[in-house]
Image (cartoon, rainbow, N blue to C red):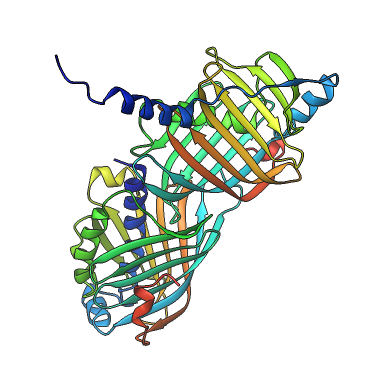
Amino acid sequence: MKAPLLPRSRFWIVMWAVCLISCSPLPVIKPTDQTAATVRKCRQPFLDTPYRFVHAIEAALPGGGSGTVLGITVFNPESKAIHSAIFTLEGFVLFDARYDGKLVVSRALPPFNAERFAEYMMEDIRLIFLPPEGRLLTAGTLEDGSAICRYEGNQETIIDVIVHRDDSWEISTYRNRYERLRTISGFSVRDGIPGMLELTGFESRNYSLRLKVISAEPLSRETIP
Amino acid sequence: MTIYRTIKRGTSLIGMLLVCTFLLGWADTWEDIQRASSKITSVSARFSQEKHMQILAKPLISRGRFYFQTPDSVRWEYTAPVRSVLLMHKGKIKRYTQGSKGFVEDRGGAVDSMQFILQEIGRWSKGRFNENEYFSATLKGGTGAHIILTPKEKGLAAMISRIVITPSPDRPGVLKSVTIVESEENYTLFEFTDSQLNAPIAESLFREVE
């Protein structure tokens, strides 16, 4: 009989370690009798007018790689249109794509040209800037008093929006009750704009990004590029 | 190719093109350029970088400082909006960016894309810019003299349309600006001020971040 790759005891240690990273159960929600106010609080991370953001993006990748690039995001919450560009500090454009009902990629250098990269990136941007469109499943508070709203996502996912008392927030997506896919945290929130965003991908999309805001500029319908 | 390597490649290509353009002397002919360049042993300057793109209403401005010492030591430093330092010294290339934990060395892949640039620097430092493997150079002399570099390779041409180098009209060896045109709506303009030629530069500037 072929020897197993790992002894049974080690296998469970490895599985436990993997689970520690990605198996994070859905937080327990304490019911509230002020659902409308809680839902309003959960809308706080999402801006209701078009904006242009410039971020310094610090990327940590599996295998220890890291690097810093600049990112520009323009979004319109009304039309749900998104335009995003990534470039080096020297100004060399690595990625440029637009979503306006249809995804159009104008430039994508390797590895930004990887299959579905642009699609996943638009998903992340949508998750950060646009409120969940799915059905509200439940709303309430966490043990520490933070407001939490749970929404139905697409493809059987669940989206939790948590807004803490200091206005910092967290948005997490789950595949089921135990499997967390992504978490986005917004810190140092001033006038509704987080000075720092942190994105962590779990499972197959294992990455970590820190986005420091360089500028946040409200746009009018006329000034949207 | 990893993200790191793509960033590195983009960085090295643009950063080092700027480095080499500093080695151009002001002149009407390539021979004059080579003569003027041979007298340059060091360069330092401040720069501003304007990124123009359709997605931006007004250009995104970065600022920094640049140092070069023959034969191949370079410090290309951004002070805003993100602090970052690229160091090249004695064949070693490192890049540090200030993040949440202070200056951190960019990691994750070989800096092999920089190696070919280092090999080129020897040629550029002699003003032999028209012998570049990757770009064809056209010199437009006279009033408002400028040099236009166009990529030789199709792959590179898909990323960079042309580079326009404008020397200072009155100071040989000093650059006024460099424009890297990726497409008509997407270009980066570098403008240089406080340029100093052949002034002593401490070696530690090419070895240490701070």
Q: Residue furthest front?
A: A9
**Can residue B173 be spotted in the picture?**
no
**Residue placed at 61% from the left, 44% from the top?**
A53
Asked if residue B74 is positioned above or below residue B157 in the image, the reply reads below
Residue A31, percent from left and from top: 78, 19
Q: Is residue A21 left or right of residue B13?
A: right
Q: Is residue B35 left or right of residue A131?
A: left
**Residue placed at 29% from the left, 83% from the top?**
B41
> In this view of the protein, which residue sits in the foreground, B107 or B190?
B107
Asked if residue A168 is positioned above or below residue B97 in the image, the reply reads above
Which quadrant is home to the N terminus of chain A? top left
Residue B206, percent from left and from top: 35, 74
- Rendering quarter of residue B141: bottom left
Residue A173, percent from left and from top: 56, 24
> In this view of the protein, which residue sits in the foreground, A162 or A109?
A162
- Rendering quarter of residue B71: bottom left
> In this view of the protein, which residue sits in the foreground, B98 or B33?
B98
Residue A187, percent from left and from top: 65, 44
Q: Is residue B153 left or right of residue A194?
A: left
**Can residue B166 be spotted in the picture?**
yes
Which quadrant is home to the C terminus of chain A? top right
Question: How many numbered marks appear?
Answer: 0
Q: Is residue B19 left or right of residue A30?
A: left
**Residue placed at 45% from the left, 72% from the top?**
B210
